[in-house]
Amino acid sequence: MKKIELDQTGIFEEKGIKKFLVHDSAYFKIINFNIKAGQTFPVHSHKIEGQLSMLVLSGTGEFLGQGDAAMAAKPGDILISDISEPHGARAITDMRILVTIAPPI
Amino acid sequence: MKKIELDQTGIFEEKGIKKFLVHDSAYFKIINFNIKAGQTFPVHSHKIEGQLSMLVLSGTGEFLGQGDAAMAAKPGDILISDISEPHGARAITDMRILVTIAPPI
């Protein structure tokens, strides 16, 4: 049993995406990504079994999918996607997301 | 790929705990629990393999563990626990948590 305080990881990079590994085990991997306003977490996918959730902690932007698919993303919005399905995110304001991957990649 | 908006599930019961199933699959189960101020999500455990995360979305309270173990819990705090390890939560103010269980129970 352990506690992680995400208010301690609210750090952004001027360009690109700041990544904090919250947890990694045989069961799931949990990562906090902080995406600077205007930056994109590129759409990608992996040909493996499993799913991920992507929760917006703060800020606004869009969840991205295959092609030009985009869904508005605000705090409390959570995306569920197969790992094999294209997924990504774009920040409009500085945006923090929590991604949970099961089983871990 | 689907999006769930947790700002639509911010409903509390006067007594007890309100539960919203966010997602259930072969890979993980995601549940939003809304715990009214003063209420307790009782400490419990299951004798199965796996882990869970418990993220505070809003409100304050405590993460509970074996015996009298308690850790302060505020928005952005995330508890990681084995499913077989005793875990629970107590709300001081109205508290919303998001629990992810992998593999699903």
Image: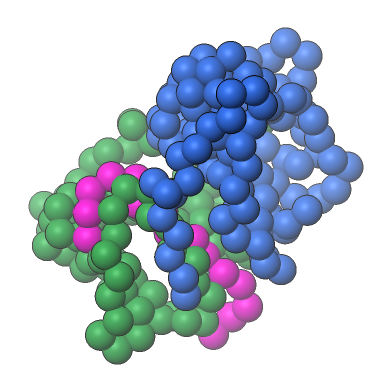
Chain colours: A blue, B green
Q: Is residue A86 visible?
A: yes
Q: Residue at point 50% right, 34% down? A: A96
Residue reaching furthest bottom? B67
- Total numbered badges shown on the rendered structure: 0
Q: Residue at point 27% right, 65% down? A: B72
Quarter of the rendering occupied by the C terminus of chain B: bottom right
Above/below status of B41 relative to A94: below
* Residue range of the region highlighted in magenta in the rendering: B46-61
Q: Is residue A1 left or right of residue A28?
A: left
Q: Nearer the viewer, residue B35 or B25?
A: B35
Q: Is residue A81 left or right of residue A46?
A: left
Q: Position of residue A80 (x, y in %)?
A: 61, 38
Q: Residue at point 39% right, 46% down? A: A7
Q: Position of residue A40 (x, y in %)?
A: 66, 21
Q: Is residue A79 visible?
A: no
Q: Position of residue B22 (x, y in %)?
A: 47, 44
Quarter of the rendering occupied by the N terminus of chain B: top right
Q: Residue at point 76% right, 42% down? A: A83
Q: Position of residue B89 (x, y in %)?
A: 29, 67
Residue reaching furthest top? A68
Residue reaching furthest right? A47
Q: Is residue A88 magenta?
A: no
Q: Is residue B50 magenta?
A: yes
- Res B67 quadrant in image: bottom left
Q: Is residue A63 left or right of residue A42?
A: left
